[in-house]
Amino acid sequence: MEYGRSRATVVLEDGAVFEGWTFAGDEVGEVAGEVVFTTSMVGYQETLTDPSYRGQILLFTYPLIGNYGVIPGEEESQKVQAAAVLVREYTPHHSNWASERSLAALLSESGVMGVEGLDTRALTRHLRDKGAMRGVISTVEHDPKVLRERANAHPSMLGLDLASTSSDITEPTLMPAIGEERCRVTALDYGVKGSIYRELRNRGASVLAMPGSTSADEVLASEPDGIFLSNGPGDPAALEDAVDTLRSLLGEIPVFGICLGHQLLGLALDCETYKMPFGHHGANHPVRNLKTGRIEITSQNHGFAVREESLPDEVELTHRNLYDGTVEGLWSPEQRAWSVQYHPESSPGPRDSGYLFDEFVRSISEKVRT
């Protein structure tokens, strides 16, 4: 049966308890992960298939989830990446003309548990006050003490390398430009959202996607006009080999990074990263472009950030989050490298930041012509 109703108990590592019932994935029984919340009101399909959410239990603050079903082609990767889903109220009946199945069906086919009926507002406030933390959801064990012990035994996101195994790319994969080719981009894929590649290709960039573990020599051998660093899950500081590779590439070819790619670029430029209390997850984060003064409403999904105090003199801060003042963009003129923490492909979310893809493709296309 698609629409399950098993009792589900959620216990956080600090002992907080929340009760609900399953609407998908009854057979999973029990799952653990870091519990984070997202404030996005739409785009649950794109969010759940975003590899940056791998290993996390995703809490939606918007109360009604599932009401437009699942639409073919809107996924960001080949599977649901979140470890489990928590909602206030699941809507089993969907009426969108393009939908072919329900959210519950997608989760069940992916072996992912979905839980509804929780007090999501109370849980969100708890995470805002205490920070994102590990949790366990169980339909077979309901003793809070036992579940708390299991939550605390689950690996912490701090120091965890998830990006090495999160990409759908296992070997170099060429995706030609849509329309006339203007330039060639080699992308280091740490768990990319598929819409990012579409944005680059729509602007005339042929994209050669390569695993994030690819060596600097292999990247240079592909003779790209520019290098793109993708988003992905986990702690950037755990990817020491990836950082060493980037250090070897800096100054050789222009580099542009997004999200985890931004953090890895920061580390390669001798900045520091740190784990945020509850991160940024949602499509309503205001960011100021410090060069133009323009404020963009952005889509974000990250739990780590670059520490501003660690920026070397030759690295410029280009964008700042207006909620908490955190670093949202970097630029190194000497190394011809820049990055943003947020998601300019905006899937889901506002379209304020697409100019970043325009600037990247234009800058390396001009180099090709000269």
Image (cartoon, rainbow, N blue to C red):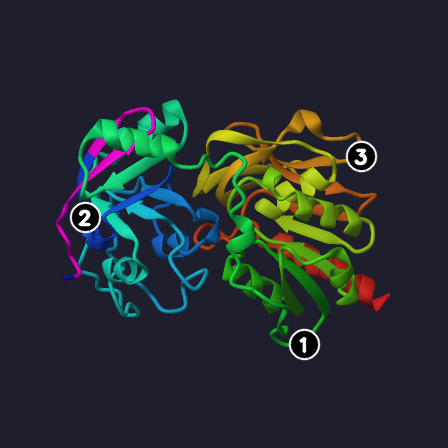
Report whether 267 appears left or right of 259: right
Q: Determine the CA span between mark 3 and mark 2.
A: 52 Å
Label 2: element kind:
strand
Question: Disc 1 vs disc 3: which is toward the camera?
Answer: 3
Question: Along the line of sight, which residue is nearer the eye, 353 or 345?
Answer: 345
Q: Determine the CA span between mark 1 and mark 2.
A: 49 Å
Residue at numbered disc 3? 314
Q: Which mark is first along the chain, 2 or 1?
A: 2
- Residue 130: quadrant of the picture: top left
Question: Along the line of sight, which residue is nearer the eye, 143 or 304?
Answer: 143
Kind of residue sitting beneath label 3: Glu
Dot label at residue 22:
2
| Mark 3 burial class by Cα count in 10 Å: few <14, some 14-19, many 20+ | few
Q: Residue at x 38, y 57 (%)?
A: 80
Which residues are the magenta region?
Answer: 2-18
Residue at numbered disc 1? 180
